[in-house]
Image (tube, grey):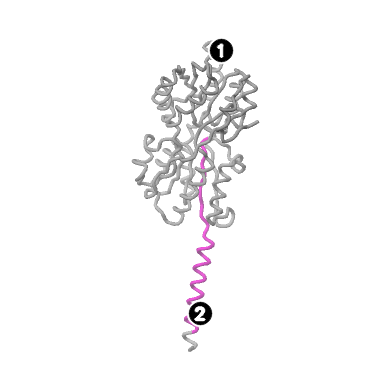
């Protein structure tokens, strides 16, 4: 081989090796935004752990080729718009956001940064025109909260056979939750021969006011749709529910882990892992508008036996048997 050919070959190999090294060392930046959970708690949250574990399986290592910035709305919906502008201003490669209302603010703040959302009703919230063809910069997963409202009422009645009146706590400013309470729950309640008692709660202190009023119009059970206000005040809510000795059902398991009676909803471990797959696809060049919004396919029933004992409720083995987890 002539010296010139050898040097050209060596230069080509060096350039190729250098490009590959640069590609291997590229650092991706993602922002994780929760509507209520404190930033410090995200580090130990099992669902975010599942999200990062899936990213690790896909080749991303936080601190090596991945930077994760964590943000919280702290349950203060009036600050969502400002938070969205701050996060967008930091220019992450992808934003992973929980909550339909929060996702709307991010969509208004950017039309270019990809947004992967885990939301209740992305079409009704105006996030995407269709699940199959989202278009734009938003995609993700839908948790089907409204579609599961009837099942939650059914489970509450199975747990409390004499159930007749159910008090529903909800924030009317949360559009998806308001539709669930006004449109979905009444239909399910009629089929189960139940009476729904809607109670509006707009601020954190409103929960105490409603619980005080319940002493006069005592229901047989409590229903809590998901939402920033409920998520941010779950310990306060659970404590009041136990003190009132009323059975309660929730949309997510976090209140049950905090002492609530039971929850039925999407399996968030599965959803977060699937969200990580979408983040990976986008980081590798996929356009969010080309990725269909996926629906939840796994659901979990979580029951807290300690809570049942505290309110004097005996749950049959038949009721407990299909539960994904029974907390004792």
Q: Is residue 318 above or below residue 135?
A: above
Write the residue at 47% across / 46% down.
Answer: 95
* Residue 23: x %, y % from top left: 50, 63
Q: Nearer the viewer, residue 230 or 130?
A: 130
Q: Is residue 43 above or below residue 125?
A: below
Name the N-terminal-most of marks 1 and 2: 2
Q: Is residue 152 left or right of residue 292?
A: right
Please check the rendered image and state whether residue 17 is part of the magenta-colored stretch, yes or no: yes
- Give the residue number, with chain letter if any, for mark 1: 215
- Give the residue number, with chain letter if any, for mark 2: 10
Label 1 CA crowd tier, 10 Å (few <14, some 14–19, many 20+): few
Write the residue at 52% across / 71% down.
Answer: 17
Dominant SS of magenta comes to helix
* Residue 50: x %, y % from top left: 56, 46
Give the farthest residue toward the front: 318
Instruction: Name the element at disc 1.
Output: loop
Q: Which residues are magenta?
A: 6-35
Write the residue at 48% across / 45% down.
Answer: 96
Instruction: Name the element at disc 2.
Output: helix
Q: What is the CA distance from the residue labelled 1 to the residue labelled 2?
A: 84 Å
Label 2 CA crowd tier, 10 Å (few <14, some 14–19, many 20+): few
User: Which quadrant of the view contains residue 119?
Assistant: top left
Please check the rendered image and state whether residue 14 is part of the magenta-colored stretch, yes or no: yes
Q: Is residue 234 left or right of residue 180?
A: right
Q: Is residue 295 left or right of residue 305?
A: left
Q: Is residue 165 above or below residue 20?
A: above
Q: Nearer the viewer, residue 31 or 81?
A: 31
Q: Nearer the viewer, residue 36 or 158?
A: 158
* Residue 114: x %, y % from top left: 43, 48
Give the farthest residue toward the bottom: 2
How many numbered discs sit on the rendered protein?
Answer: 2
- Residue 30 marker: none
């Amino acid at each position: 081989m002539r010296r010139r050919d050898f040097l050209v070959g060596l230069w080509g190999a060096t350039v190729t090796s250098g490009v590959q090294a640069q590609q291997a060392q590229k650092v991706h930046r993602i922002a994780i935004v929760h509507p209520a959970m404190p930033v410090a708690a995200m580090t130990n949250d099992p669902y975010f752990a599942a999200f990062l574990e899936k990213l690790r399986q896909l080749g991303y290592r936080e601190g090596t080729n991945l930077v994760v910035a964590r943000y919280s709305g702290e349950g203060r919906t009036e600050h969502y718009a400002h938070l969205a502008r701050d996060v967008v201003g930091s220019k992450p490669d992808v934003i992973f956001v929980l909550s339909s209302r929060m996702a709307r603010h991010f969509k208004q703040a950017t039309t270019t940064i990809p947004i992967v959302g885990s939301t209740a009703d992305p079409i009704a919230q105006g996030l995407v025109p269709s699940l199959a063809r989202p278009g734009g910069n938003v995609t993700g997963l839908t948790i089907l909260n409204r579609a599961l409202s009837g099942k939650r009422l059914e489970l509450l009645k199975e747990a409390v056979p004499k159930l007749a009146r159910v008090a529903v706590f909800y924030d009317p400013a949360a559009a998806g939750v308001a539709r669930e309470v006004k449109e979905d729950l009444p239909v399910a309640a009629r089929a189960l021969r139940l009476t729904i008692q809607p109670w509006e709660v707009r601020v954190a202190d409103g929960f105490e006011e409603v619980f005080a009023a319940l002493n006069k119009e005592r229901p047989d059970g409590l229903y809590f749709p998901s939402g920033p206000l409920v998520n941010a005040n779950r310990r306060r809510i659970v404590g009041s529910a136990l003190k009132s000795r009323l059975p309660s059902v929730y949309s997510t398991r976090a209140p049950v882990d905090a002492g609530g009676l039971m929850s039925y909803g999407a399996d968030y471990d599965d959803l977060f892992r699937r969200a990580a797959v979408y983040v990976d696809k986008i980081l590798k060049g996929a356009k969010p508008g080309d990725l269909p919004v996926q629906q939840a396919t796994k659901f979990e029933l979580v029951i807290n036996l300690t809570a049942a004992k505290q309110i004097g409720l005996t749950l049959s083995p038949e009721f407990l048997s299909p539960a994904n987890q029974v907390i004792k």
